[in-house]
Image (spheres, helix red, strand yellow):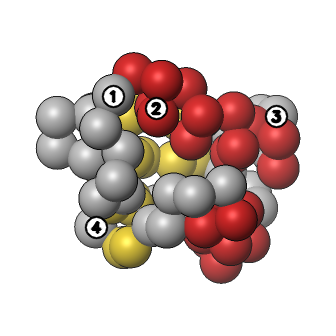
Amino acid sequence: MKLRIENMTCGGCARSVTATIKNIDPNATVDIDVATKLVNVQSSVDEQKIKEALAEDGFPALNA
């Protein structure tokens, strides 16, 4: 899934986003480009569950 996180502005944000996703699915592959605010996630977990967790942690995500 490809997500866009508008308020992800730095490496610290990227690490937080990665940690949130990895907490839900430790086997997920997370590729982040802070400059474009895009996150590419490969996970067996439902996309909506990942979006909800990101929103709870202050990083609401939209489909890219």
Q: Earlier in the sequence, mark 2 or mark 4?
A: 2
Q: Badges 2 and 1: C-beta atoms under 8 Å apart?
A: yes
Q: Position of residue 17 (x, y in %)?
A: 56, 41
Q: Badges 2 and 4: C-beta atoms under 8 Å apart?
A: no
Label 4 Cα crowd, 10 Å radius (few <14 / some 14-19 / many 20+): few
Q: What residue is shown with label 3?
A: 26
Q: Position of residue 47 (x, y in %)?
A: 62, 71
Q: Secondary structure at mark 2?
A: helix
Q: Amino acid at mark 4?
A: Ala
Rendered view: 39 above or below 30: below
Q: Amino acid at mark 1?
A: Cys
Q: What residue is shown with label 4?
A: 64
- From the viewer's perspective, tell me whether residue 63 is left or right of residue 56: left
Q: What residue is shown with label 2?
A: 14
Q: Earlier in the sequence, mark 3 or mark 4?
A: 3
User: How much space separates mark 1 and mark 3, taking CA atoms?
Assistant: 22 Å
Rendered view: 21 above or below 2: above
Q: Residue at x 33, y 28 (%)?
A: 10
Q: Position of residue 21 (x, y in %)?
A: 68, 45
Q: Badges 3 and 4: C-beta atoms under 8 Å apart?
A: no
Q: Earlier in the sequence, mark 3 or mark 2?
A: 2
Q: Nearer the viewer, residue 26 or 36?
A: 36
Q: Residue at x 68, y 72 (%)?
A: 52
Q: Residue at x 36, y 73 (%)?
A: 63
User: How much space separates mark 2 and mark 1, taking CA atoms?
Assistant: 6 Å
Q: Secondary structure at mark 1?
A: loop
User: How much space separates mark 3 and mark 4, taking CA atoms?
Assistant: 23 Å
Quadrant in which residue 22 is drawn: top right
Q: What residue is shown with label 1?
A: 10
List the single residue furthest toward the left.
35
Q: Badges 4 and 1: C-beta atoms under 8 Å apart?
A: no
Label 2 Cα crowd, 10 Å radius (few <14 / some 14-19 / many 20+): many
